[in-house]
Amino acid sequence: MRPDKMLSSRFNNDLDKIASSLIRTYGLKYERKIDNLSRPLLRWLDFRLRYVDPRPRRVCLSNQFPKKLPCPAHQGLIDFSITNSIGSDINRLQGKGLVLFNDTSGKKATQRTDHLWADWGIHHFHLCTKEQIQKSYFSPRSDWLAFCFVQPNSIHVIDIRPHTEKNVFSNDELVYILAESWPEVMQHYELRGILPGRSPTPEERKALRRSGVTSFINIGEKAYAPLGMGITTASTPTRVSHAEMILHQYTAWLGSYLIEGKGTLSEKIKKEGVKLTELELTLTKEGVALYSPKANLAWRTSAHPEDVLTIISNAVAPDWAIAFAKHRTENAALAWHWEPLKPS
């Protein structure tokens, strides 16, 4: 095997090792019942992409608001808006299913991901005003759900609906409200030149999702691709498979970059007496880095957002994951590398 191919293959295995450690650290459900769906990176990316990165976000309400809500839902929406505005963690409002229910490797296809998120890219949050259970991360379940489209710097609250509403997770009205309230969001998903057909009913859409079938969204005279990229025939999120594929492309590029010596990084590593072919990817307190077990040295090229190691690190282990893993490592002595980085 060519040295660059061998190195890229090792990097892919290393990402699976990092993902396995993160899966254990977060206690994610991971049954590994289906061989071709049991890659650790696939399981971890489903959680990582559904997890909302904690940061301040502008709260935008759809044209459904103002609307009359029961007191608990109204207060829950106020609390939810404040939490987003100050950048606090809102993932506890996603419920335990984020960790303990969905599993891409599970035997039950209908439980491999959150179908609403995978299909339409819409999150749902429990608007709970009950007192937090001591030592429990997740908030208690709520009778009212906030359906939201999350973007890097804003969160679009589409609607507040009761948890008991029939087919609440497959009702096209959620997408209609999103399109009417924020047409600039929907325009990125418009399928130009395609005439819309008959829209599935909520019951039919639910059945299609359970069977691993993705369908277009029809609004008026326009057809749109699913905002979440849809569901594969294995009932896993297409966006997760796509993210895994992109990461493998980056590891292939990184292997070629190092072996061909296109930059100064290869020379710096060689000066330390380290063979390029013995490098691996590991997780340090500063993110994913190149690591030599023999020399006990690690390298990051830069913090530039377009740097390939920065891209890989942000995709696999963003700051919030590193902070949590570091805390768990210090307390549970998990076998991770936390060596200081060699200046480069």
Image (cartoon, rainbow, N blue to C red):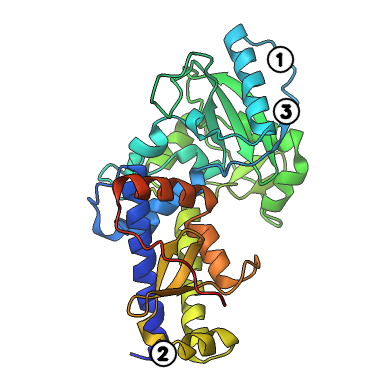
Q: CA distance from mark 3 to mark 1?
A: 11 Å
**Image coordinates for residue 250, horizontal then vertical, percent:** 51, 73
Quarter occupied by the C terminus: bottom right
Task: Indicate the secondary structure of the residue bearing disc 3.
Answer: strand
**Can residue 86 be seen here?**
yes
Tell me which residue sits at (24%, 51%) in the image: 32
Nearest to N terminus: mark 2 or mark 3: 3
- The residue type indicated by label 1 comes to Lys
Query: What is the quadrant of residue 85 in the picture?
Result: top right
Quarter occupied by the N terminus: bottom left
Seen in the picture, residue 79 relative to 172 is either above or below; the reply is: above
Residue topped by disc 1: 67
Of the residues tagged 1 and 2, which is closer to the observer?
2
In front: 157, or 152?
152
- The count of marks equals 3
- The residue type indicated by label 2 comes to Gly
Q: How crowded is the residue under tag 3: few (<14 C-alpha within 10 Å), some, or many (20+)?
A: some
